[in-house]
Image (cartoon, rainbow, N blue to C red):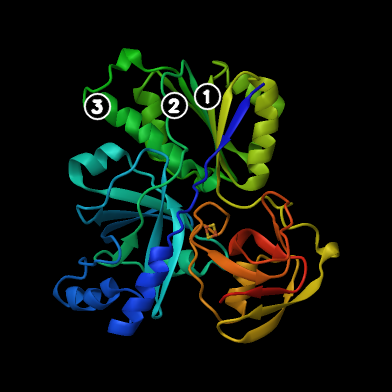
Amino acid sequence: MASIHSSSTQPKTDWLQAAGKWLSQALFNTDTAADYFDVLAESVDPLWSLSETRAKVIEVIQEAPGVVTLVLKPVARWTGFEAGQFVQLGIEINGSRMTRTFSLSSAPCLWKSQGIVSVTLKRIPEGKVTGWIHENIRTGQIVSLSSAQGEFTPPVNAKSIGYLAAGSGITPIMSHLREYVASIESGATEQTSMVPVTLVFYANREEDFIFSRDLSLFARQYDWFTLHLIATEEQGQISLSQLQKLLIDTPEQVYVCGPGGFRESAISLLQKVCPNATIHQEAFSLSPIAMGSSEDAQEHQMYLTKSNRQVVVSSQMNLLDQVEAAGLSPVSGCRMGICYTCKCQKKSGRVKNVLTGEISDAGEETIQLCVSVPVSDVELGL
Ligand code: FES
C-alpha cells in the first residue's frame, strides 16, 4: 500500500504570552514591549524590529498571467529553510497587518550563499492580499517573514522521485528542483549520482505554466530530469493511462501539490500506478467537497464576546470569512488549516472541522477559524 504524508505544523501555546501582553498594555499601551520599541527602531531603519523578522523586496518578477515572484532579502537573523517549506508573509495594507502563507520557490543554497529567498504567488480571485500584492508591491517595500515550516521536503536516499503539480502547486516543487540543480552546479553532488526525477505538470493552457522556461532548460541540460507539461484544455485532465505512460520509472517517492480536487484524483491514481510508493502531498486549497453542498446550508447566531457583536452566520462558510465579513481582522495565514495563525478561543457552541469532518463539543476550546464552520449558535472570544 502507498503511504501518504500530509504536510502540517502544530502550534505552540504559551500562557506567558498572555501575561506579557497584559504587562505591556499596562506599561506601554501596546500588545508587547517589542511593539513599542519597534516604532522607535523603524524610524532609524524600517528593517529593524524586535517583534518580527523583516525582509526587503528586491525584485518583482512576472512569471505567468496572474503569477508573480517576490525576491526578498530577509535580515540576517532569519533562520533559513529547507526546499519545499512555506512561510507566512506579513504586509501592511491600508493600515492593517495582513498575513498569508506562501511556498518558497527558491533553493536554500541561494539563501546560504547570497541571503536571498523568493516566494511565488498566484492572484486569487477576490483575494485581498494577493490582489493587493499584484497591483501595489514595489521593490524596496518591507514585509515580515515568519520562520519556515512544513514537511514537504526532499526525500533522503530515494531511488527515483516523481512530482505531480497543478497550477501554482509547482512552487514548492520548484524549490526542490532548484536545490538539486544548485547542488550539482556547486559540485556538492555528482551528476552521475542523481536519481531519475520525473515531473508531470498540469495547467489550463500553455501560457499558464509557471517557470516553464527554467523547467525546460533543466530538462535539456540534465539527463536525470524528465519533464511533461500537460495543458489540460488540449490534453485533458489527469488520468490513469496518462500516469502509467509518463511515470515509467515507477517512483519510490511521489510529491503531489495543487488544488484539493487535483490532489484527491492524483493520489487515488497513484495508488494504482505505483502502489508501493510513499506519497507526500501539500495543500494549496481546501477540497471543494470540504464545505458540503449549499442545499445543507443552515443559519446560526455568532456572538463575538470581546467586540460585543452578534451576527447571523452560515454553516456553509468558514468562521474566518464570516468574522472578517462582520468587520473584524483576526490574524490569519494559509486559510486552509496548515499554519494555525487563525486559532481562536471558542467560548461555546459546536463547530465542524471541514478537514477532518469532526464536530466539536459545545464547551470552551481552541479552534482554527479558517477550517471551522458553525453547526450551532457559537460564541467566540473575539
Ligand atoms: S489561517 Fe492558517 S490555519 Fe487558519
* Foreground tag (2 vs 3): 2
Percent of width and height locating residue 346: 62, 68
- Vertical position of residue 13 compared to residue 305: above or below: above
Percent of width and height locating residue 128: 50, 70
Percent of width and height locating residue 335: 55, 59
Q: Is residue 259 left or right of residue 362?
A: left
The mark that comes first in sequence, 2 or 3, is 2
Q: Which mark is residue 155?
A: 2
Residue at the limit of the structure toward the bottom, as seen here = 308
Instruction: Look at the numbered discs 2 and 1 and tell me whether their residues touch, using CB distance below 8 Å.
Output: yes
Q: The disc labelled 1 sits on which kind of residue?
A: Gln
Residue at mark 1: 253
| Residue in front for this viewpoint, 241 or 116 | 116
Q: Residue at x 28, y 48 (%)?
A: 79
The mark that comes first in sequence, 2 or 1, is 2
Residue 231 occupies quadrant:
top right
Instruction: Look at the numbered discs 2 and 3 and tell me whether their residues touch, using CB distance below 8 Å.
Output: no
- Vertical position of residue 197 compared to residue 301: above or below: above
Q: State yes or no: Cβ of the residue under disc 2 lies below 8 Å from any atom of ligand 1.
A: no
How packed mark 3 is, by other alpha carbons closer than 10 Å (few <14, some 14-19, many 20 or more), is few
Q: Give the Cα separation between the discs numbered 2 and 3.
A: 20 Å
Q: Which mark is residue 185?
A: 3
Q: Is residue 352 left or right of residue 62?
A: right
Q: Give the Cα separation between the discs numbered 3 and 1.
A: 24 Å
Q: The disc labelled 3 sits on which kind of residue?
A: Glu
Q: The disc labelled 2 sits on which kind of residue?
A: Pro
How packed mark 2 is, by other alpha carbons closer than 10 Å (few <14, some 14-19, many 20 or more), is some
* Foreground tag (3 vs 1): 1
Split into 4 quadrants, where in the image is the N terminus? top right
